[in-house]
Amino acid sequence: MEVMAIESDPAERMTRMGLLNTIVVALHNFPEGVATFMATLAEPTLGLAVAVAICAHNIPEGFAIALPLNVGSGTPVASSLCAWFLT
């Protein structure tokens, strides 16, 4: 297996970082969904508050996905769609 060289292409490194962020955020969203579901079962108003807080929390996650992908690939539409659907 080849080790990534320090002097590798910056665009390739940014794309790799964006894809890694996408995977991590997708895994991170599952427990958030479970927490929202459980809070809603316990008390619907609490579930709404948790859902609003998670929505606000997902905005910077979307930027963490979209910006490296945009820099790496140069396609703002594709990177924005990836961030929109995966966060």
Image (cartoon, rainbow, N blue to C red):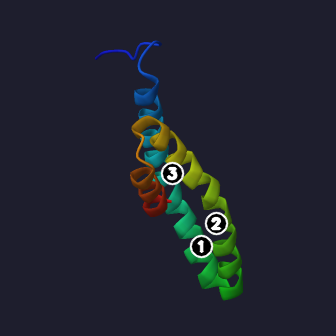
Residue type (three-letter) at the residue carrying disc 2:
Ile
Q: CA distance from mark 1 to mark 3?
A: 16 Å
| Label 3 CA crowd tier, 10 Å (few <14, some 14–19, many 20+) | some
Q: CA distance from mark 3 to mark 2?
A: 13 Å
Between 78 and 59, the residue placed more toward the observer is 78
* Marking on residue 4: none
Residue type (three-letter) at the residue carrying disc 3:
Val
Q: Position of residue 33 (x, y in %)?
A: 53, 68
Q: Position of residue 2 (x, y in %)?
A: 31, 15
Tag 3, which secondary structure? helix
Label whose residue precedes the other's in the sequence (1 or 3): 3
In the image, residue 54 above or below residue 38: above
Q: CA distance from mark 1 to mark 2?
A: 8 Å
Residue pointed to by mark 3: 25
Residue pointed to by mark 2: 54
In what quadrant of the picture does the N terminus appear? top left
Q: Position of residue 63 (x, y in %)?
A: 58, 50
